[in-house]
Amino acid sequence: MGKQRRIVGQFLEIQLPDHTWTYARVLDKASFAFYDVHSLNKIADINFLMGKNVLFIAAVFNDAVTSGRWKKIGIYPLEARFHILPFKFIQDEIDSADVRLYNPNTGEIFISNRRACIDLEPAAVWDAEQIEERIVDYYAGRTNVWLEKMKLK
């Protein structure tokens, strides 16, 4: 696959290690929305994808797109639901009581508590391979090793 640029609003086709397909959307600030789509066949209908729920939003290194690993299949302006990125949590590895909220929209970090962070994604930048494994594990009903390492303690 050839080189490509990361452009906010792009739809991306991702071939998973189990030879199925899933789809993502390029958001602002290194973030991607991963749709609740797991298919044996490629899907080219962007309107179909836009109607799907989002499994999670995570930051991913740009080379997932720029290397051509995740292939762009179209682009469309972001819907309002993607204009404000969800908060993430940061937890100190040594002192698990030290929990903070991270606002990816502004870069601000706030002192918080565990309860406020329960349903949030960890503040991390993922490799393409880690995201792909996470999605395969989700659909297989397995615990993902990468997410387990980063989960709230």
Image (tube, grey):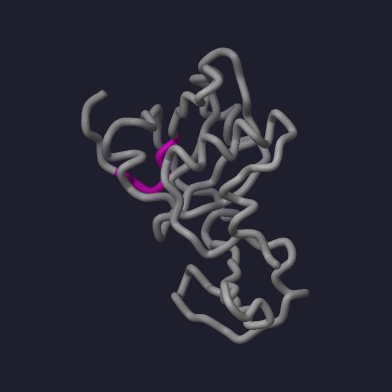
Residue occupying the far bottom of the picture: 111
Q: What residue lies at 55% left-to-right and 20% top-to-bottom?
A: 18
Eyeballing the image, is 22 above or below 10?
Answer: above
Residue occupying the far front of the picture: 94
Residue occupying the far left of the picture: 3
Residue occupying the far top of the picture: 41
Is 66 left, or right, of 132 in this rendering?
A: left
Overall secondary structure of the magenta section: loop
Residue 85 occupies which quadrant of the picture? bottom right
Q: Position of residue 41 (x, y in %)?
A: 55, 13
The answer to which of 125 and 107 lies nearer the viewer is 125
Is 63 left, or right, of 131 in this rendering?
A: left
Eyeballing the image, is 151 above or below 69?
Answer: below
The magenta region covers 6-11
- Within the magenta stretch, is there residue 137? no
Q: In which quarter of the image is the N terminus?
A: top left
Q: What residue lies at 70% left-to-right and 28% top-to-bottom?
A: 140
Q: In which quarter of the image is the C terminus?
A: bottom right
The answer to which of 96 and 121 lies nearer the viewer is 96
Q: Where is residue 48 in the image (x, y as percent from the top left)?
A: 60, 27
Q: Position of residue 101 (x, y in %)?
A: 60, 76
Q: What residue lies at 30% left-to-right and 43% top-to-bottom?
A: 63
All told, the count of numbered labels is 0
Q: Where is residue 24 in the image (x, y as percent from the top left)?
A: 50, 38
Q: What residue lies at 40% left-to-right and 60% top-to-bottom?
A: 29
Eyeballing the image, is 35 above or below 8?
Answer: above
